[in-house]
Amino acid sequence: MWSVELGDKTTPVALGAGRRMASKRSFGHRGYVLKATVRSLNSPDADLETYVPGDLKHVGVLIQIFAGPDGERGEDSIDVLVCTPGWLERSISDKGIIVGRHYLIIDEWNFPRVREYLIKAVESEEGRDWEELGQRIGRLGKWEFEDYRPFDSNEHR
């Protein structure tokens, strides 16, 4: 996995810890709200800082956004497939059908522009707690706790 560190380096903690550690709040239009901070952007597909595709118009790269509560430790993962229309067209012709949820479609590969967009999109969201904030951020990419339900031993009897 390749990563891009943002801001101060943080010590990795268990995923999901952000949800339990959400205590820093600011006063917003809806009362006290929680904001997120992007800790890093990673990709299992490429070194995001140095990747130069053969064709800037035919690119599909999975980017994992690690974000947590502003001013607190902990982070969760949000996965988004960043791709171009040319990559989509080729994938559709190969597969016939593609579900478009959690795709960020760009005109051509430009990582600084993608990084700026992702950071602004995540850090502009706010919520009453980490669960609400995670659901809002999850509109951009697949939040690791999307569709999560706590274990209920009564359901398994």
Image (cartoon, rainbow, N blue to C red):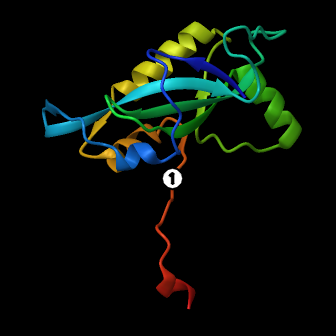
Residue 75 relative to residue 106: left or right = left
**48 shown above or below 143:** above
Residue at 44%, 14% (x, y): give it: 7
Residue at 62%, 11% (x, y): give it: 111
Amino acid carrying mark 1 in the image: Glu
Considering every residue shown, the one lying at the far bottom of the view is 157
Q: The residue tagged with tag 1: helix, strand or loop?
A: loop
**125 shown above or below 52:** below
Q: Which residue is mark 1?
A: 146
The answer to which quarter of the image holds residue 104 is: top right
The answer to which quarter of the image holds residue 112 is: top right
**Residue 83: percent from the left, percent from the top?**
68, 24
Please state, as top left, top right, bottom left or bottom right, where the N terminus lies in the image. Answer: top right
Residue 21 relative to residue 119: left or right = left
- Pick the front one: 101 or 80: 80
Residue 119 relative to residue 95: left or right = left
**Residue 58: percent from the left, percent from the top?**
78, 17
